[in-house]
Structure formats: C-alpha cells, structure tokens
C-alpha cells in the first residue's frame, strides 16, 4: 500500500488539493492545456482499468449477461408503470441502445474505483453536493454529452463509492449554486451551433423539402431514414420502390417540448422494484442507479413523446422500415419503429461501421438483436437474418485521388468515456504511436502530410493536436470539419492510424491505403484473422507505426507501382468482397432485399 493520497476524480480543479499528496483517478483529470498546473503537484495517476485484451472480453460478456437479465425486468416495470403490455422487443428498440451504453459505463466506473481503493490508500476526496439532484438527461443524445461532464462524473463516482466502498475516508462537500444539468438535447449539441453557413443552408432545404414531400407520401410507403446512402442513390431507391422520394433527417428539436424534470420520488419507487441484491458489485450498482440515470423521455416525458409522434406525417402502415443510423439516438424514430414492429412491420438495419463481424468486443450489438434483417456490407452468415449487400456509404461515389497530392493521416477520435475500459489512457498510447510514426517519416512525405483530427467535443476540450504540435511545429492539421472525401481526393495516399470504417471506405474505392495499429490482431475474432493477414502480407496493414512509416518512405515516389501490383490488388479485392463489397447496381440490390 502507498501512503494515503487524496483522490481526484475529475479535471475540475475546484475539487483538487494542492497542499498534499494526491492521486488522479485517470488521465482524463489532466488536461494537456493545464500541464503547468498538474505537473508540479505531488501526484500519481491510478493504474488504468480494463485495457488488457482478455479483460476487455471478460467485461464485455459481463455487460451482455447483465443486460439479458435486466431487460425483461425493466420491460415489466415499464409496462406496469404505463399500464400497457408491450413486448420485450418493443422496449429493447426504445431503451436498448441506452441500456447497453450505461451498463458499459457503470462497469467501468465501478471497477475503476474498486481497483483504485484496492491498490492505493485513499485519505479523502471532494464531491459536489447533490441533494435531490438527478443524474438523468433528457434522451440518449444528451446522455452522451454528460458522460464527459466533470461534475456529472464527480457525483456519479460519489454515489458508486457510497454503494461499494466500505473504508472510512474524508469526504469534503463542495457546494455549487450552478450545479445542475441541462436536459435539453439540442442546447447541448454544440456542433449545431458551430455548423458553417453551407451546412445550415443545406439543412434548411432538406427540412423544407421534407415537409413538402411528406404530403405526397402514401400510408403504406416504406419508411427510409438515415441509411448511409448518398442522396442521389437514396432518391433512386425511393423511385424504384414506386414512392415519392423522401429525404428524412433527424430533427434535433423534436424533444424540445418535453419540459418535464426527473421525478425523484417516482424513480426511488421504481428502483425498489428493480433492486435485487447480488454478490456482484457491478450488478448492485446498476440496480441501485439505473432509474436515477434513466433518460426523462423514457419515463416522465414518454406520453409527450407519443404526442410528438402522433403529429408526424409519417406512413401509418409502412411496408417496412429501413435505417442504418437512427436506431440509436433518434427517440421519435425509435418509438415509431417499436410501435410499427408491434403491428408486424419488418424492420431493416444497415451496417454502419467496420466493427461488425470482426471485432470480438462487438459480438452482440443491440442493433442486430432488434431488427428483422441486418443488411451487411458483404459479410454473410448461415442465418436468414443477415443479408449481404454492399458498402452503403461509398456506393456511387467517384474514386478520385491525386497521384502527386498529400499524405493524409486520419486520426482516431478521442472516445467518450462509456466503454468498459479506460479509453482516455488507451488514447494516450495511441498518440504516442502517432509521434513514433511521424518521427520515422522521411523528408518527402513529411513535407506533404496533413493530419485529419477527429471532430468531437472531447477532442476540442483535450486539444490533442497540441500534443503533436509540441513535438513538431511544422505539422498541418484539418480540424475535422471539411468533408473527408475532399481531403481524400487531394491526397496520393491515405493512412488510417487505427482499424476504422475509413479503411473499408478507401479500400472499396481502390484508393492507395495504408493502415497501422498497435494491438496487433488482438481485437479481432479468430475466424477473420486470415483475411487481415493477407493485407499485412502485401503491406497495406501494419502492426506497428515504424513498419507503416518505413513502407511509406519506400513507396512514396511510386505509390501507384506498389498499389497496382497484382498481389496487392488481389488481396484488397478478396478482403473487400467480404467486408466492403461494391456492386454494379446498388439500387436493385437493395430493392431485392427490402421487398
């Protein structure tokens, strides 16, 4: 055991102590912009939780197991509360994505604290006063914003400590008159505020057209939204289905009329119906806090959500429902879909990322469970549920790149903290690999490099670009706002610094591509490793930043000669045929699957 240390759980310096030995719960507490403050403290950072590959797998399966146990209980409680008899699938469509996410988050917070208290002697900590303060957000989208909110996490950690830590430590209560959470999803969505003029104008015309087109929609038209398809193909698909083309987009202001606040008394009552003591700390914490965290739109605002839906000019009895993205945080769409599925309508979800079927920490995604059929980008399985199609987001896109252009390095986004493992620490390892990669590049590619940053709120807060600028002042960055396809078109080589959807996109377009990541093939399922090994053998995928940089130095002046070798093209084509397939007639392919 180390000497007693004061525990710091957030980046908020008002909760810090500067006159004693302290321990930061994780790297998220130490903003790079505040390095001049924290580097002078008598401080250490607690050991990160859950980064080991085997631990990730254990924790992921633990989440799945508890989800399967809790969901039927939750559905029964909600049916009783709303005096209805909705199916388990109905509630899974509505609350399932949030439940999976919050279970991952609670496992991480619980085990991070347990590990910290087991490994170190903690003398005390500072918590915000949270008397009668709910941790619930309005909806799924605004929940995401809270996951990185320092005050929200401080209070959540305090509540978890009360439930699982039996050691006496000094708790200092910090009163804050402004301590409350915004429930409104739209007001929290800062990306909407910072949108450029073209994006806002484009959105205005989409909304205007959508209102006109909805009046021409028939009640039995297939309902299509957020498909990942380019707009021109979406229009052709609607016409091929013999229905007036609709360009539907999620309306971020839909829930603004919900002004209900969390009913503390109601939530305590519902918690008593869910509480069932277990020998497992994670399960006990979840049962104790689930309804305290439960979004308002699923409880106090649920009736109003139904009222909002009743005013939508959407098909009353659609032939089918098809989305790729809206299943997650579009609350009105989820309610619409759940209602239609109860009436026997078919629900299709399209693949919307690279992790499906390859990543072993993504084996049981909610979206595969709740749909009737899952449209893959080429992958097939001996199950009627999975229908192979093509990579939706690059279908019909022009395959253009500049043979004398830039070296485009695409950075991973700093992930929000809702994984079972310590994602901020993992991101620090990632950044170190980027520096290793940049150090090894020769003068030619170094002069042409453009680094595409992830455009996320956490990225802006942590300012990861400064960590790289600090290393090399000549680096040029794209802040993550410009359309990625324009950057690709201006580049001679695209480098993906992690196993990403972007890798599938550029490979499917036959654009010269290199990828590297640091965990070798640990994150992959055993049955897919041979497919990735083919790309390693021809120099497309590299298992270290040094190897990737050396390959780029070797081919920089003759990238085309390397890329169009038969062995490289054959390996790329075999891989894409399984994971990022292209077809000559994407519209006909989809029509055949949907009808």
Image (cartoon, helix red, strand yellow):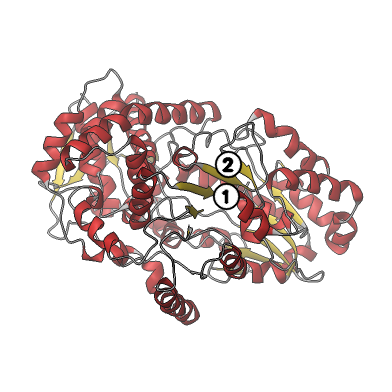
Mark 1 near mark 2, Cβ–Cβ under 8 Å? yes
Residue 43 relative to residue 356: left or right? left
Q: Is residue 260 above or below residue 230?
A: above
Please tell me the numbered disc located at residue 353.
1
> Residue at label 2?
356
Let me know if residue 18 appears in the view: no
The answer to which image quadrant residue 484 occupies is bottom right
Where in the figure is residue 235, as x and y percent of width and height? 57, 69
Asked whether 261 or 484 is in front, the reply is: 261
Q: Residues within 10 Å of mark 2 (few under 14, many from 20)?
A: some
The answer to which image quadrant residue 460 occupies is bottom left
Residue in the image at 50% along x and 40% along y: 368
Mark 1, secondary structure of its residue: loop
Asked whether 374 or 280 is in front, the reply is: 374
Where in the figure is residue 262, as x and y percent of width and height? 16, 50
Asked whether 587 or 99 is in front, the reply is: 587
Where in the figure is residue 415, as x and y percent of width and height? 47, 50
């Amino acid at each position: 055991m180390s000497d007693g240390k004061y525990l710091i759980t957030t980046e908020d310096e008002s909760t810090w102590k500067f006159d004693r030995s302290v321990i930061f719960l994780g790297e998220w507490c130490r903003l790079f912009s505040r390095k001049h403050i924290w580097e002078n403290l008598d401080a250490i950072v607690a050991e990160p939780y859950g980064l080991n590959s085997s631990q990730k797998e254990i924790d992921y399966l633990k989440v799945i197991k508890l989800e399967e146990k809790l969901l039927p209980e939750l559905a029964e409680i909600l049916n009783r509360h709303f005096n209805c008899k909705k199916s388990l699938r109905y509630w899974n469509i509505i609350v399932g994505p949030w439940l999976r996410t919050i279970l991952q988050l609670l496992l991480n917070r619980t085990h991070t604290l347990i590990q910290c208290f087991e490994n170190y002697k903690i003398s005390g900590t500072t918590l915000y006063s949270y008397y009668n303060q709910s941790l619930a957000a309005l909806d799924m989208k605004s929940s995401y914003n809270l996951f990185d909110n320092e005050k929200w996490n401080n209070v959540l950690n305090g509540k978890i400590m009360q439930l699982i830590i039996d050691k006496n430590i000094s708790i200092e209560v910090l009163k804050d008159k402004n301590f409350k959470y915004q429930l409104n999803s739209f007001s929290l969505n800062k990306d909407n505020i910072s949108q450029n003029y073209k994006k806002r104008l484009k959105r205005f015309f989409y909304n205007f057209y959508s209102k006109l087109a909805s009046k021409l929609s028939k009640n039995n038209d297939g309902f299509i939204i957020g498909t990942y398809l380019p707009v021109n193909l979406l229009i052709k698909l609607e016409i091929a289905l013999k229905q007036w083309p609709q360009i539907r987009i999620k309306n971020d202001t839909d829930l603004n009329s919900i002004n209900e606040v969390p009913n503390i008394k109601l939530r305590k009552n519902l918690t008593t119906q869910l509480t069932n003591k277990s020998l497992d700390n994670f399960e006990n914490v979840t049962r104790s806090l689930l309804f305290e965290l439960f979004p308002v739109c699923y409880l106090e605002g649920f009736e109003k959500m139904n009222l909002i839906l009743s005013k939508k000019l959407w098909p009353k009895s659609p032939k089918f429902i098809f989305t790729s993205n809206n299943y997650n945080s579009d609350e009105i769409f989820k309610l619409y879909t759940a209602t239609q599925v109860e009436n026997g309508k078919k629900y299709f979800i399209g693949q919307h990322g690279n992790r499906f079927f390859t990543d072993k920490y993504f084996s049981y995604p909610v979206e595969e469970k709740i749909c009737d059929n899952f449209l893959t980008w080429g992958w097939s399985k001996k199950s009627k549920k999975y229908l192979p199609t093509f990579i939706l987001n690059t279908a019909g896109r022009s395959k253009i790149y500049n043979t004398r252009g830039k070296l485009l390095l695409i950075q991973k986004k700093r992930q929000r903290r809702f994984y079972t493992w310590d994602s901020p620490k993992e991101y620090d390892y990632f950044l170190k690999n980027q520096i290793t990669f940049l150090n090894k590049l020769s003068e030619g590619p170094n002069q042409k490099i453009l680094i595409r940053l992830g455009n996320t709120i956490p990225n802006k807060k942590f300012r990861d670009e400064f960590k790289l600028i600090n290393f090399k002042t000549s680096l040029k960055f794209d802040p993550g706002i410009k359309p990625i396809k324009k950057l690709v078109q201006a580049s001679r080589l695209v480098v993906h610094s992690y196993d990403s959807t972007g890798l599938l996109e550029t490979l499917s377009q036959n654009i010269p591509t290199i990828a590297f990541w640091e965990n070798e093939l640990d994150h992959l399922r055993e049955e897919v490793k041979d497919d990735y090994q083919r790309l390693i053998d021809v120099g497309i995928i590299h298992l270290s930043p040094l190897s990737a940089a050396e390959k780029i130095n070797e081919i920089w002046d003759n990238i085309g000669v390397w890329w169009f070798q038969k062995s490289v093209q054959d390996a790329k084509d075999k891989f894409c045929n399984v994971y990022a397939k292209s077809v000559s007639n994407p519209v006909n392919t989809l029509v055949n699957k949907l009808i």
